[in-house]
Image: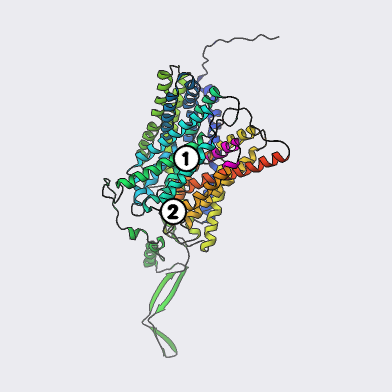
Amino acid sequence: MSKVQNYGTERVSLGLKKSLKVIFPYAWNKLLDQFKSVWFIITYLIIFQTLVLNLPIVYSLTISFGIFWVIVGLSFFMEGLEIGLMPFGEIIGSVLPKKSPLPGILLFALLLGIGATFAEPAIAVLKAAGSSVSPDKAPLLYSLLNDFSGQLVLMVGLGVGIAVMLGALRFMYGWSLKMLIIPMVLLLSGLTIYAHFNPAISATIGLAWDCGAVTTGPVTVPLVLALGIGICRIVSKGDDGGSGFGVVTLASLFPILAVLILSIYHFHAQDYVGQPNYKGTAVISNISESYKESSQNITFGFTQTEYEEYLKSKNLPKDTEKEYTGTTSRLEGGKIIVENVSAIYSKKSKDNIDKNSLKHLNPDTNGLATLKGAVLTAAIAIIPLSLFLFITLRFFLREKVPHADEISIGILFAVVGMAIFVIGIELGLTPLGEQLGSNIPSTFTTISPWGLDGHKMALTSDSVGKIIACVFAFFLGFGATLAEPALNALGATVEKITTGAFKKSLLMNTVASGVGIGIATGVFKIAYNIPLQYLLIPPYIILIFLTIASSEDFVNFGWDSAGVTTGPITVPLVLAMGLGVGANVPGVIDGFGVLSLASVAPIISVLIVGIIVRLKSSSKGKKPKPSNIEGSQS
């Protein structure tokens, strides 16, 4: 029997070379993990624009640079969450129920929800969306995103905070998720119908429902689940293995309610653009002019560059059509003489894009200003949340901070990572999403391509072009969702909970199909200018009946499955794409609503498949039973 040697607790100094040998493979694997979640959606977007739409990528070098920093930033950010913020959440989640009375737990849950929301990367994208909304078309929506953007984020955070409070109460008292979901859906449907009949508030419906998708990101979900799992460990009675589920669902529903209430408040306060109590600087110019068809602003024919070339060389492009008017002809000396000729040169009805206008670098990029803004955004998002968790643990719960040096490095990583990620979003993902979104309408209408001079003729007929756009959107949602790391984790957890009755692969394909259908429906809604509420309320009414018919464990992870659709890559791209499409379809006010439809569809698909799985298991004489686990991560 060999002796076990005790080498003590002395620290080992490896030196720079050996340290790099240890760190490099680890860092490389982290970068690869983020690359795997990004490569499909980026490649798909580029291929669709270059091959299907036959348009080049404008600012390609700037966008490539931005996407690279997105991958690097996410790697740092996720590592920072894991070694910096998550230990705080796990310790507090396990200690808080033991040392604090119920009011203290609820107050912490409220503040945690608000702080986590401010730290979500997608919130920065939501703020930036205000620049694409016209005060002429949607004055209240414009004011919410610009004049009241701080209030908007605070209300969204408050909604998440209240949701976390209810989630904590649900964990402690074993409430059914159904009794929370069904009344909430009915309330949201009622407020949405009320908003529908008010033109000013109606324009904010898409924003409100999309805010529910923005909140369940990489910061909120892990911290909230850490709190929930900690409470479950203390109060667990060994019953439902899905007890850790549900809080993500609540965190996506309550922000919708908060934004709708904020919209109604400002409408009655009459303090938005164009109203008597407005104190901002925006001015409504001419509402009737803002609704003109976008195609009316497109000039067909030669560009200024082509005209100047003609003046120099007298040569015309090969696609020129010639027409002669005002002529008189006579026969003289066996020759036909044409006099008083007016020659008109015009281009054939085809794409008229000036390739010389293509730029590979964005000339408007201000590197220093972008860096300063990104660092400030990251510091405001991460540092207050970290201080709140530290103060709670050290001074209220009187617990020591374990591995304080590691946690400090983790928080630094989170700040640096988020700053880099915000830079990448601004330089890469947002321009790429806006560009593709702006160009998608070229499948069914003539547009001015994003960042290019000239016009792009419709790819095909109106109906066929819109079908192509919807098919593109489906595969975008399907592929992007399968690439989300959170979906793999959810699939493995659900397979364990149902003891193999609901396979991981089945759940992943079901959720991905639902997201694809949702995003395709969102593009369909924009292409045909259908009010969002017509496509949103019926699915939620269906969900009420599916929820009643489903077992508690399937309801838990079915509703939470929508949370995996809102990853840090998917949200900025889909949000920017929807706004880009909306800005280029005549008569459409905005492009909000795609994310909300991408969230509701997978819930329906998972619950339907869950009912089928349960019926098949029952017919075979066995029922899928939840295993005794205390939580999950989605």
Q: Amino acid at mark 1?
A: Leu
Going 70% across and 41% down the picture, which residue do you hit? 616
- x and y percentages locating residue 629 in the rendered image: 60, 28
- x and y percentages locating residue 496 in the rendered image: 64, 32
Q: Nearer the viewer, residue 133 or 236?
A: 236
- Residue 217 vs 228, above or below: the answer is below
Q: What numbered label is drawn on residue 327? A: none
Q: Name the image quarter holding the C terminus.
A: top right
Considering the numbered disc 2 on the image, is that residue within a helix, a strand or a loop? helix
Picture quadrant where residue 258 is located: top left
Residue pointed to by mark 1:
253
Tell me the magenta residue range: 547-562
- x and y percentages locating residue 466 in the rendered image: 52, 58
How many other residues sit within 10 Å of disc 2, few (<14), some (14-19) or many (≥20)? many
Q: Nearer the viewer, residue 277 or 81?
A: 277
Q: Mark 2 or mark 1: which comes first in sequence? A: 1
Going 63% across and 43% down the picture, which residue do you hit? 609
Considering the numbered disc 1 on the image, is that residue within a helix, a strand or a loop? helix
- x and y percentages locating residue 622 in the rendered image: 71, 36
Q: What numbered label is drawn on residue 582? A: 2
Q: Does residue 557 belong to the magenta stretch? A: yes
Assign the magenta stretch its main secondary structure.
helix
Q: Does residue 560 belong to the magenta stretch? A: yes
> How many numbered discs, if any?
2
Can residue 448 be seen by looking at this rendering? yes
Extreme residue toward the right, this view = 620
Q: Nearer the viewer, mark 2 or mark 1?
A: 1
Q: Amino acid at mark 2?
A: Gly
Whether residues under marks 2 and 1 lie with C-beta atoms below 8 angstroms apart, the answer is: no
**Left or right: where 563 falls relative to 289:** right
